[in-house]
Image (cartoon, grey):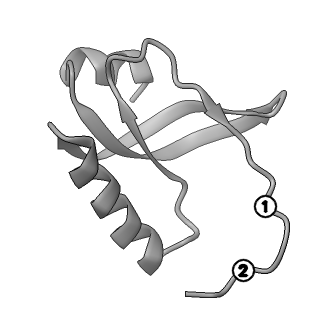
């Protein structure tokens, strides 16, 4: 599904979605195709589910975003330092 399709299907909602097809370009993550995991009225609930899912499987590229945004703007971050696993 494309972002503009998701916006039409779920107006004024928070979406937890997984990037199916994505690429990096100029420090941004471009999501060409996405898969909706869940839909929320409140962002806090979406972030809670994101955290739980991410804790179980860090390999999945998941995001929480509100459909009021016409474009997906996902800035890439480079993590520096030591991370605690788990």
Q: Are marks 1 and 2 in contact (CB under 8 Å)?
A: yes
Q: Percent from the top left, x then y, of residue 64? A: 40, 43
Q: Indicate which disc residue 83 carries.
A: 2
Task: Tell me the quarter of the picture where residue 75 sits.
Answer: top right
Q: Residue at x 45, y 76 (%)?
A: 55
User: 32 or 84, which lies in front?
Assistant: 84
Q: In which quarter of the image is the C terminus?
A: bottom right
In the rendered view, tell whether residue 34 sits above or below residue 13: below
Q: Indicate which disc residue 79 carries.
A: 1
Total marks shown come to 2
Task: Tell me the quarter of the picture where residue 76 sits.
Answer: top right
Q: Pick out the residue farthest to the bottom.
A: 85
Q: Residue at x 43, y 24 (%)?
A: 2
Q: In this view, does 80 lie to the left or right of 15?
A: right
Task: Tell me the quarter of the picture where residue 73 sits.
Answer: top right
Secondary element type, mark 1: loop
Q: Indicate which disc residue 50 carries.
A: none
Disc 1/disc 2 C-alpha distance (Å): 9 Å
Q: Is residue 55 left or right of residue 24?
A: left
Q: Percent from the top left, x then y, of residue 31? A: 58, 32
Q: Percent from the top left, x then y, of residue 20? A: 51, 45
Q: Which residue is drawn at 52% across and 24% down?
A: 72
């Amino acid at each position: 599904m494309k972002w503009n399709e998701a916006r039409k299907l779920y107006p004024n909602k928070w979406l937890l979605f997984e990037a199916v097809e994505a690429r990096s370009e100029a420090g941004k993550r471009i999501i060409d195709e996405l898969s909706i995991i869940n839909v929320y009225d409140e962002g806090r609930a979406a972030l809670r589910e994101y955290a739980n899912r991410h804790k179980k499987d860090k390999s999945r590229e998941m995001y929480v975003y509100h459909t009021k945004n016409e474009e997906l703007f996902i800035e890439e971050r480079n993590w520096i330092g030591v991370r605690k696993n788990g």
